[in-house]
Amino acid sequence: MMNGFKEVEPSFEDCLLMLSKKLVDSSSTVNIDSLLDAFTALVGDCDFHSSQRNKNIETFLKRYGSSVDEINKMRMRASHFTLIKVIGRGAFGEVQLVRHKRTNKVYAMKLLNKFEMIKRADSAFFWEERDIMAYADPMWIVKLHYAFQDLKYLYMVMEYMPGGDLVNLMANYDVPEKWAKFYTAEVVLGLDAIHSMGYIHRDVKPDNMLISASGHVKLADFGTCVKMDSDGLVRCSTAVGTPDYISPEVLRSQGSEGVYGRECDWWSVGVFIYEMLVGETPFYATSLVATYSKIMNHQSTLTFPDDVSISDAAKDIICKFLSNRNVRLGRQGVAEIKSHTFFVNDEWDWNTIQNTRPPVVPDLTGDDDTRNFDNIEKEGLPQESFQLPRAFAGNQLPFIGFTYSREFSPMACLAVSQQTLADAKSDLQRLSMQNEQYASELGLVQETKKLADACLQQVNADSSSIELDCLKLEKELAAVRLELKETSRKLEQELENRKQLEVMLINVRSEYDNLQNAERKTKSEHAIDMDRQISELNERIRLQCDSEEKLRTLFNELQESYNNQDLALRELRIKYDVLTSHCDEAQENLKSVQAQLDAERAQSTQQSQLLLSTKERNDALQIKLDYLREKYTKLTDENQTLTEKKHNLEKEYSITELELKNLRDKYEQEVQNYQNSLNSSQIGNEQCKSESTFVSELEKKLRDEETLRHSLQQQLNDVERQRKVLSLDCDHFSDQIQQLGMEGENLKSKVA
């Protein structure tokens, strides 16, 4: 009862309707496909050799094992598709071009190894990939048609993008700025579709931008996507992405928890625009360390080549994308990206770009044309799978609910059957109306025949008296007979049509009866399911009754305990009466008690003094504790600063090591050239002197680099030594803080 109103519970019919909607809804976690997945997974995980020792599992498998086998035969599986070609391969599986045997449609089917998914759970985001392709806007995202599974693999059947990826397009064409505007705009719309669902892509690059048969771009490969928190941010301790396209904030998350939002995808878009216009990524380097160093120092390393013509608007949007995350373009929403002057043109806008002809439309020879994809060598799929468990491991449980289909789901087929039944009823009514119409027309024809017969009889009766009109009447009679014959022919045709309609009516009624039988069978299955639910409710009621019985037993025990306590109370009252009788005797001892009271007062004064000294000591310890905590905080900050300094010195050391190696190679080459020139008599003394000078300079530079390397190594060692000392100090102060805390608790207990 709240605010005077009683909450109204939904009726049983409403509950069934809500449950039915959940079973049919493909986005529900308890839809019919998820329940079948759970049933199949439970049987698969229980079916191991040692499970036969468990009577309950053995009974369960005997009861439902064969049923699950039948269910798997009736659900979608890999054998329903014909392999055309392997068009991609990755760490977790491969992508195949396949044709559906029943519909003859071509799809791209992605296979993911379940064992690898579990083993690399920190980097495998198959749920995110499935949900995005299933529910995102298919105009800019590759569409998922089906998702299914077996004991070893996950399968995602997606629309095939025969135009290949943008890497292939950039390799075959010099992309002008006009094209770059178009493709960047479609990528922005695709990322906005993902962000609006609450996800971040984290691996935006031309390899994941696929071209459809019409030439438009769609985003793909969502295996690195992650769901944003309620504040629009992601907290992750692993740097995910491709080195050339990764943003500084994501790079910082390697080894420590990083916090970033959807703006990391806009950084990758800036790299993508630069690559289209220049021909290479802006922070490309020969080594990974150098690439990461350029990304972290992007303010000084981002430059534009003089030999490439790039408009000011293009440079501006690239610089705004490749900036710090706090001021990066797109941080305040996609609207500020769409309003940038880089996208201004007279051919399309953000609302009409989907209907605009793309710069390049693929020239295809058929729906299974793969010329825009690299040839992948045929290799067997990885056979590594789950080990045979000794006990229940639940290996299939993480994949329950992965199955998805827009068309071929059990509840969808039931809906189609119900629609077919309704159509059959409508056809039956229409045929009945036509039959009534034909019967009415048949009556008119018979009435016409009767009138013609009457006229013929009248003519025959009057033929003796009207000899002059005989010929005329004979002609009329012939005409009437001809009309009668035509009418009879039409009547026979109508009768034949009526017979056909009656046959059709019988067939429709037979089909209607079959559909009614199927519906009754479905209702019977529903009744069985309801019986099962009733049995479960009865079991719950039985458990509730057992619980109530236990509560009654406990109540009786408590009642007995109460009676015992009451008896003990009576005995105490009797003792109290006895003690009261001795009260007079206690009065005689009052003097001695008074003396004892004086002694206790003296002891109380002593305890008060002890309490005062204890409080003073506690205050001193608290001051010391605050000081140690402050010092501990400072040491922690210094330790973190030294750790960061260590990382920077390690990067500088790696770069210096690389440069030192290059100088050594160059020095050895120059020394070799110098030795060769000394052995040749055709080279003059001046050239020898100049080369000797050059070698000396190289030796000096090499010594300087070696000195710098030793210096950096020494600094690195010093920082590491200081960090260890600080760590020991932190541990020591932490122990002191803990000890002081214990002393404070002891003092408080003494005071109490």
Image: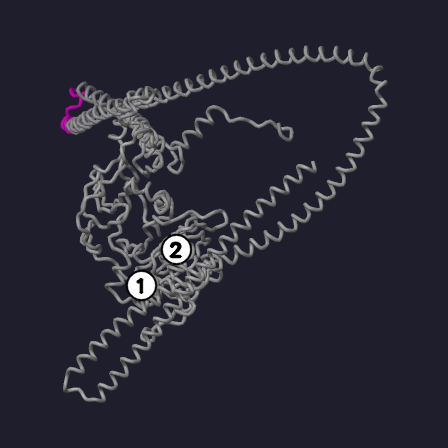
The amino acid type found where label 2 is placed reads: Leu
Q: Residues within 10 Å of mark 2 (few under 14, many from 20)?
A: many
Question: At numbered mark 2, what does the secondary structure look like: helix, strand or loop?
Answer: helix
Q: Which residue is mark 2?
A: 189
Image quarter in which the N terminus is found: top right
Residue 188: x %, y % from top left: 39, 57
Q: Nearer the viewer, residue 365 or 561?
A: 561
Residue 738: x %, y % from top left: 57, 45
Q: Residues within 10 Å of mark 1 (few under 14, many from 20)?
A: few
Q: Quadrant of residue 103?
A: top left
Image quarter in which the C terminus is found: top right
Q: Nearer the viewer, residue 562 or 157?
A: 562
Q: Quadrant of residue 153?
A: top left
The amino acid type found where label 1 is placed reads: Ser
The answer to whether residue 469 is magenta is yes
Q: Which residue is mark 1?
A: 287
The answer to whether residue 500 is magenta is no
Left/right placement of residue 77 relative to residue 234 reads: left
The answer to whether residue 191 is above or below residue 12 is below
Q: Nearer the viewer, residue 220 or 177?
A: 220
The answer to whether residue 514 is above or below residue 649 is above
For the record, the magenta segment spans 462-475
Question: At numbered mark 1, what does the secondary structure look like: helix, strand or loop?
Answer: loop
Left/right placement of residue 462 relative to residue 663 reads: left
Alpha carbon separation for disc pair 1 and 2: 33 Å
